[in-house]
Amino acid sequence: MKTEQLWSEYRSKLKTYLIGKLESEADIEDVLQDALARTFAQLKAGNEIDNLNAWLYRVAANAVNDFYRKSGRTQLLDDEVVIEQAGNASEIDSLSQCIEPFLSQLSQEQAELLRAVDLDIRKQSDLAQELGISYSTLKSRVQVARKALRAQFDRCCTFELDDQGNLVNRGKKSQGCAPC
């Protein structure tokens, strides 16, 4: 597949992914260009890529981390599990449906924050402004909500992660788990 064809197919998906990770349109465009350059170099070298979609999201996540590292700002992806969007819509829908019962176990504020930031992929800076709170306060609340959600998952579910922290398998711990 040619780089131009590949990039036209995936650019908007990657841009949507980056909206929740970066603060400005200029930063998003910079990271997209960096990801394009990395993609071009990899394809030009003739290296085989097993799962192209997952690989592109990993390139984008790495480009975000490098962007924050170079600019000396706090990295947003350090405390997050980057879920690879492998393009399997039914699996993504299944995971979204799986999350809802767990979200209902959280406070209403925590559930709404996570729906907005992680499911609807809204920019945290925009959401903070809309809620009338500082950006750092919102980021802190989102992290607390994510930890609470993780505790709900840990109570009921098992996870298998690869070396990069990507989810590769999931299951139930017991049949009696209330949210499941």
Image: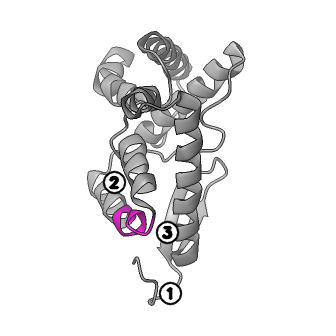
> Which residue is rendered at x = 44% and y = 61% of the image?
107
Most foreground residue, 1 or 130: 130
Tell me, what colour scheme is on the image?
Answer: one colour
Q: Bin the neighbour count of mark 1 within 10 Å (Cα to Cα): few under 14, some 14-19, many 20 and up.
A: few
The answer to whether 15 appears left or right of 137 in the picture is left
- Amino acid type, mark 1: Ser
The answer to whether 30 appears left or right of 96 in the picture is right
The quadrant in which the C terminus is found is bottom left
Residue 102 in magenta stretch:
yes
For disc 2, the marked residue is: 92
- Tell me, yes or no, whether the two marked residues, 3 and 1, touch with CB atoms within 8 Å: no
Residue at far front of view: 132
- Amino acid type, mark 3: Arg
Residue 170 badge: 3
- Amino acid type, mark 2: Ile
SS at badge 2: helix
> Which residue is rendered at x = 53% and y = 53% of the image?
145
Most foreground residue, 178 or 50: 178
Labels 1 and 2: the sequence-earlier one = 2
Residue 174 badge: 1
The answer to whether 69 appears left or right of 34 in the picture is right
Find the distance from the CA under tag 1 to the CA under tag 2: 23 Å
Find the distance from the CA under tag 3 to the CA under tag 2: 13 Å
SS at badge 3: strand
**Magenta part of the chain:** 99-106
Q: On screen, 60 above or below 147?
A: above
> Which residue is rendered at x = 36% and y = 66% of the image?
98
Q: On screen, 20 above or below 42?
A: below
Residue 131 position, x and y percent, is 39, 35
Foreground label between 1 and 2: 1
Residue 126 badge: none
- Tell me, yes or no, whether the two marked residues, 1 and 2, touch with CB atoms within 8 Å: no
